[in-house]
Image (spheres, helix red, strand yellow):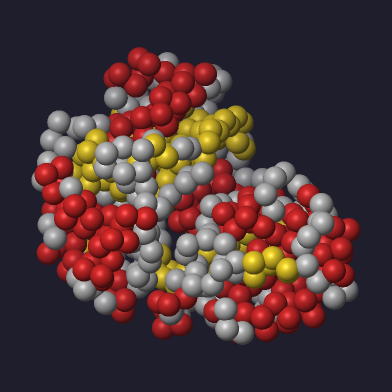
Amino acid sequence: MSKPPLIAVFDVGKTNAKLTLVDPALGQEIWSVRRANEIVESPAGPQLDVVAIETWLLEALRSAPERERVAVIVPIAHGAAAVLIDHAGEVIAAPDYEDARFDEVADDYCALRDSYSLTFSPHLPQGLNLGRQLYFLQQRRAGEFRRVAHILMYPQYWSWRLSGVMATEVTSLGTHTDLWRPHEQVYSALARKQGWARLMPSMRSAPERLGAIRASLAAATGLRGTCEVACGIHDSNASYLRFLLDREREAFTVVSSGTWTIVMANRGDLRRLREERDMLANVNAFGAPVATARYMGGREYEAVAPGAGQPDVAALQVVLQRGAIALPSFASAGPYAGRKGRLENAAGLDGAQHAALATVYSALMTAQLIESLGAGGEIFVDGPLARNALFAGLLAACVPVGTVRSYAEGGGTRVAAHLAGLPAAAVGALQTVAPLRIPGLPEYQANWRHRLEQPP
């Protein structure tokens, strides 16, 4: 009897790329490997290093155990990113959204945007609005932009590189791009007027299989030629989807962590969104808008706690007793982006204590975002923060309502199976996280919030 099929999940985050083999029949990840991503300089400005990532991917697939069992590859990638392709299939540009030069066209671009009430896409710095990246290239590198034949959202760039079939998918298109109106489910007036909408391939759903892998890819990796490629999805929406599959009609909140900490409130009220606080509507895999708030959590954690210290309760107690505090913001985006981040009473903290300070800061920020959305129901934590020994318990202690819960192993494999169109084993039971009751924490939180109300 032949062994059941495997799924290869190719996840390209802003900081790392990861390839994971998933056995949906067992509900387990059986192998994974990752690399750190880099930004490369070019005449067109800082670029995503798509060439190096692809080279690494091919080698990773070639070295993967039981690669001949891989039936479907599922691409997942971060938002605010697209790759521009010419008629010959060559990359013209793969801009990095943190290129400060995009701010040079901010005023002119702002005048062209659809209103926030239509796109729920806040006006963001640098290239965090994908539309501003496209406008900059159209205005400042017009000769190159005239060669553009296709604009591919980042997950669909990878599905095209793997399958040879181009597609557009709504979760990336609806991620603060200024290019999509989620209530109407149409391209924005900006995208149509500037001619960008016509450069987008046809819309496909995230789980839809685009076709078999390229013959050259099969030859280079040892994958079967019948292995197919799914259309792919935006990374935070992949995290959100694992919980949405079982409770689409319920109110719940997902905290998706990584370079960004993104809070998505299912059945949240879009009227609570405030553009000046970097609140937005993401668009889920079924095309519905999702009330969202976020900050650059991974980047800010590293700013507060550089290095590899691990937090523990003893370290947290030292932080609270000393009144060590981190006040936002340590990144260019988020609800407090206009403030300059600072640490107080933190001199002399060791690695574990800095990690505890960064963890309690992350919990306080996340609780603030959950409250700003008026989110209800259970709260699910996903990504690196779910592996932090203190975070979920601190969050449970800091939110006024809502039970913090987490999956045992198997939650991620189920969403991979859904995106691959394969049956999966049942996931483990949800686990309730007990609030971390530490003396002085309520007073610490109240002081932190009071400080936020003061002028920066």
Residue 104 place in picture, x, y as percent = 28, 61
Residue 29 is left or right of residue 349, and the answer is: left
**Quadrant hosting residue 174:** bottom left
Residue 75 place in picture, x, y as percent = 41, 40
Nearer to the camera, 427 or 340: 340
**Quadrant hosting residue 404:** bottom right
**Quadrant hosting residue 86:** top left
Residue 381 place in picture, x, y as percent = 63, 59
Total marks shown come to: 0
Q: Residue at x 22, y 38 (%)?
A: 92
Q: Residue at x 13, y 35 (%)?
A: 87
Residue 240 is left or right of residue 352, and the answer is: left
Q: Is residue 428 visible?
A: no
Q: Quadrant of the N terminus?
A: top right
Residue 332 is left or right of residue 386, and the answer is: left
Nearer to the camera, 352 or 67: 352
Q: Is residue 31 visible?
A: yes
Farthest-out residue, front: 347
Nearer to the camera, 130 or 228: 130
Residue 46 is left or right of residue 56, and the answer is: left
Establish if 199 lies above or below 30.
Answer: below
Residue 219 place in picture, x, y as percent = 35, 15
Establish if 386 lies above or below 444.
Answer: above
Q: Residue at x 12, y 57 (%)?
A: 195
Nearer to the camera, 223 or 80: 80
Q: Residue at x 16, y 55 (%)?
A: 139
Q: Quadrant of the C terminus?
A: bottom right
